Amino acid sequence: MAPDEKPPENFRSREQQATLGLLRTADAVKRSLAQVIEPHGITPQQYNVLRILRGAGPDGMPTLTIGERMIEQTPGVTRLVDRLERKGLVARTPCPTDRRRVFCRITPKGLDLLKELDDPINRWDAQAVSVLPPSELDSLINLLDRVRASNY
């Protein structure tokens, strides 16, 4: 076996092969994305929070809603927002009608950072799936949607 060749894997089933392939692919994609985002001083999860808040507009949204919209569900949304607030990328304001709720909004500095990342992320998106022709990309989107929907 050549030094760069991987040993053959034995899978118990095609389902196992598919799910392990999906997990490995997700890990590879996450690591690749991190290489684009982290040089800008934030993590991919923090980037996700900023994108959610940019989409929320100037009124922002409650922390719990951010957590529901995250790509990766995490119990640590408050800690993510804490870090972004310390960096000046997010601001929090108490809800005027419910003291238990806090609204988060992206700051101008956060918007500037996202503008700086927009082109590199768009290039990364295109490169990440560049091996797939449009018809296969459409199939991949549909298949991933179906698998994700069956696991909720």
Image (cartoon, rainbow, N blue to C red):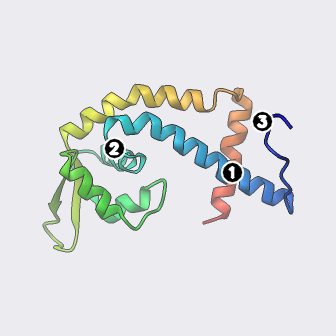
**Amino acid on which the number 1 mark rests in the picture:** Leu
Q: Earlier in the sequence, mark 2 or mark 3?
A: 3
Q: CA distance from mark 1 to mark 3?
A: 25 Å
Q: Secondary structure at mark 3?
A: loop
Q: Which residue is mark 1?
A: 22
* Quadrant into which the N terminus falls: top right
Q: CA distance from mark 2 to mark 3?
A: 36 Å
Answer above or below: position of 124 versus 50: above
Side of 150 where 99 appears, left or right: left
Q: Nearer the viewer, mark 1 or mark 3?
A: 3
Q: Earlier in the sequence, mark 1 or mark 2?
A: 1
Q: Residue at x 66, y 49 (%)?
A: 24
Label annotation for residue 42 = 2
Q: Quadrant of residue 64?
A: bottom left
Q: CA distance from mark 1 to mark 2?
A: 26 Å
**Amino acid on which the number 2 mark rests in the picture:** Ile
Q: Which residue is mark 3?
A: 3
Answer above or below: position of 72 versus 120: below
Q: Residue at x 30, y 62 (%)?
A: 79
Q: Nearer the viewer, mark 2 or mark 3?
A: 3
> Residue 121 at x, y = what percent?
45, 31
> Residue 108 at x, y = what percent?
19, 38
Answer above or below: position of 39 versus 20: above
Q: Quadrant of residue 10?
A: bottom right
Q: Residue at x 77, y 53 (%)?
A: 18
Side of 146 where 50 appears, left or right: left
